[in-house]
Image (cartoon, grey):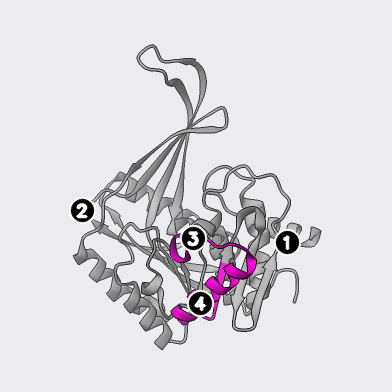
Amino acid sequence: MKLLPDLSRAKLLVVGDVMLDRYWFGEVSRISPEAPVPVVKIERIEERPGGASNVARNATALGAHVTLLSVVGDDEAGARLRELVEAEQVVACLHKDPSIPTTVKLRVIGRQQQLLRIDFETQPSHDVLADKLADFELLLADCDVLVLSDYAKGGLTHIGKMIELARAGGKTILVDPKGDDYSRYHGATVVTPNRAEMREVVGRWENEQDLTERAQALRRALGARALLLTRSEEGMSLYQDSGVLHEAAKAREVFDVSGAGDTVIAALAAMLGSGATLAQAMHVANSAAGIVVGKLGTAVVHSEELRAALAQD
């Protein structure tokens, strides 16, 4: 296989919880006289798609064709999120729910360090989610890979039905999980927990063999073809019927790990949608993760960066 296949062949449908990531950058020069907290003089504001919308923009940055299906509020943040994802060539199918605000994560950054994060979020109503399921069936027909990005905000209430429909259509199904009950992901092709998420489900493992046994048991219980465990500085491990495959972490400077899981599943989906094997897809996803953790906040990896990193490897 070439270092990177033609990822424009991949047609992805990304469904899940979206959010608007806002960053307020400023200078810290004194402590407040009102309380022992730093005073931040804001000098610059940035806004980026977060959650499932970050998965979508990462996949389009690599060249894949991506449709995003989710729920936002009928508000300024929802409108802004739509603008941002459409500007990055994502086809946005964002249902409006006037009863909720769009999920916003506001981070205050001073001296290149995050000082504070403020979250604005409410669960979407059942009616809007039901409408989303009807759209899902229409959009599913035109994709090869389904990515379900679960941030436990309520956007995947009907995930069981979505997986059932995707399986019936012969689609590859990737799930970025959340919570301690993975039974709702039964039937997915690949599940991609990180270490903390894995521990929440299978408990603490004593050694590598113990981890392998727990991971394989979970994979079999879910009826999944593979389980990809992302392990930060320990790299990644891919569990399949044929055994375990490990990828060492790329030795790059870690600046910010937020959104790294989004980059991993986006790269994995784009590769699989282009005809790559799971082993090839994991290798590329691992390289993409090594790049994105060197960037601040929810960021993307472009195909040119990835090709350069793979050439170095």
Q: Quick check: 7 above or below 256?
A: below
The earlier-in-sequence mark between 1 and 3 is 3
- Occupied quadrant, residue 243: bottom right
Residue on which disc 4 sits: 217
Which amino acid is tagged 3? Arg
Q: How dense is the environment of label 4, judged by Cα within 10 Å: few (below 14), some, or many (20 and up)? A: few
In magenta stretch: residue 16: no
Callout 3 secondary element: helix
Q: Is residue 6 left or right of residue 258?
A: right
Q: Quadrant of the N terminus?
A: bottom right
Residue on which disc 1 sits: 307
Pair 2/3: label in front: 3
Prevailing secondary structure class for the magenta stretch in the rendered image:
helix
Query: Marks 2 and 4: CB-CB under 8 Å?
Result: no
Query: Marks 4 and 3: CB-CB under 8 Å?
Result: no
Residue on which disc 2 sits: 98
Callout 4 secondary element: helix
Give the alpha-carbon distance from disc 2 to disc 3, as whole Å.
37 Å
Give the alpha-carbon distance from disc 4 to disc 3, as whole Å.
14 Å
Q: Residue at x 26, y 58 (%)?
A: 96
Dot label at residue 199 = 3
x%, y% of residue 311? 79, 61
